[in-house]
Image (cartoon, rainbow, N blue to C red):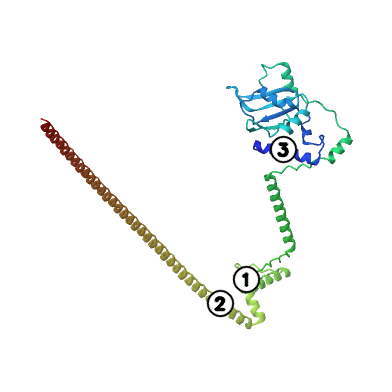
Amino acid sequence: MNPLTKVKLINELNEREASLGVKETVSWHSEYKDSAWIFIGGFPYELTEGDIVCVFSQYGEIANINLVRDKKTGKSKGFCFICYEDQRSTILAVDNLNGIKIKGRTIRVDHVLNYRPPKDNEDMDDITKRLREEGCAPKLPDHSSSESEEEEQYAVPVKKPKKDKKEKKKKKKEKKALKAEREQRERLAQTPPRPVPTVRVKQEKEDLGYDKYSQRGAAEERLRSRGERPGPGEELRNPRDTHRQEDGEFRNRYGDQQDREGDRSREDEKRRHEMGERRDGGLQLESKRTGREEGERTRERERDNDRNRESEKDSDRNRDREREKDRDSDRNRDREREKDRDSDRNRDREREKDRDSDRNRERDQSSKHREEHSRERDYRRK
């Protein structure tokens, strides 16, 4: 902060307390009741310790002064620290001498809460060392509870320190995140549950030959349940023989009508099979044709892309050639301009030479005229 603004703020605070009639115990000076040191800054560099003591001793006896100087040159830096014997003198000095002008410069006077003495304590006396280490502030007794209540009544409202901007931004971000989470939860609670997708189960195709095999297996089980076994000459070597034997028994039982129905079903199956093969073959041919057509289309597209790329390359080359031609033309123009400039310079030089020759001629003529005049004068005088 600028020191002049600090001077203005201290004076405004003192005027406000004076207008409100605040007691000394509640004043802002009471914060520095344990320190008798004050800070003085902004005074001219020509002032010495004696000059400062003369000015500030009118409000109390000065016990110690520390004028800050440059270590190399020994010149003052324009600020110092003063310690009074009585701490109340610091209040008078701050209230009355803050903002005054000394030799055209406004000085700043303020309290010092924790004065740190300088480290170079080798050439000091024992008294100054003790004063700098302990300080000069008196130790006042604690106030009673009644006085503290009165102080609270006349206390000046102090503004709360502003929080950092970073902390405020973090809190805003956290609030926004919490709001977004709450909104999401409310939306989920309001939305109705989605219906479970139904699973479609494929139905198996009916196999016409499955009934025959099931009937054959049932006939074998019947024979086994009766305990009847074929003789040694009647053993069935292959399953086809067993099927034939069962078919013969079935024909004997139910007649020739069932055989005819079986033949019809077999013929229908053959026709269906042939129709399916024809359909599959047609589909395969169509798929082959579509595949070939798609391959040809992709090849044509690739060819078109290659042609477009080649045309773009040719256009780029033509553009580069035109640019090179333009550059060559610009270079030729520059060369012609330089030639013209050189010719103009040569012309100027020739003109200057002509002018110099004319001047020399004029000088020679003037010199000749002077000689002739001088000769005529000499002749006349004779």
The type of residue carrying mark 3 is: Asn
Residue 225 quadrant: bottom right
**Mark 2 secondary-structure assignment:** helix
Q: Earlier in the sequence, mark 1 or mark 2?
A: 1
The residue that disc 3 covers is: 11
- In what quadrant of the picture does the N terminus appear? top right
Q: From the viewer's perspective, tell me whether residue 249 is left or right of residue 307.
A: right
Residue 93 visible: yes
The type of residue carrying mark 1 is: Thr
The residue that disc 1 covers is: 242
Q: Position of residue 81 (x, y in %)?
A: 69, 26
Which residue does the image show at 17% across and 38% down from the upper left?
366
Q: Earlier in the sequence, mark 3 or mark 2?
A: 3
Q: Position of residue 210 (x, y in %)?
A: 64, 72
Whole-angstrom CA distance, mark 1 to mark 2, is 28 Å
Say if 211 sits above or below 299 in the image: below
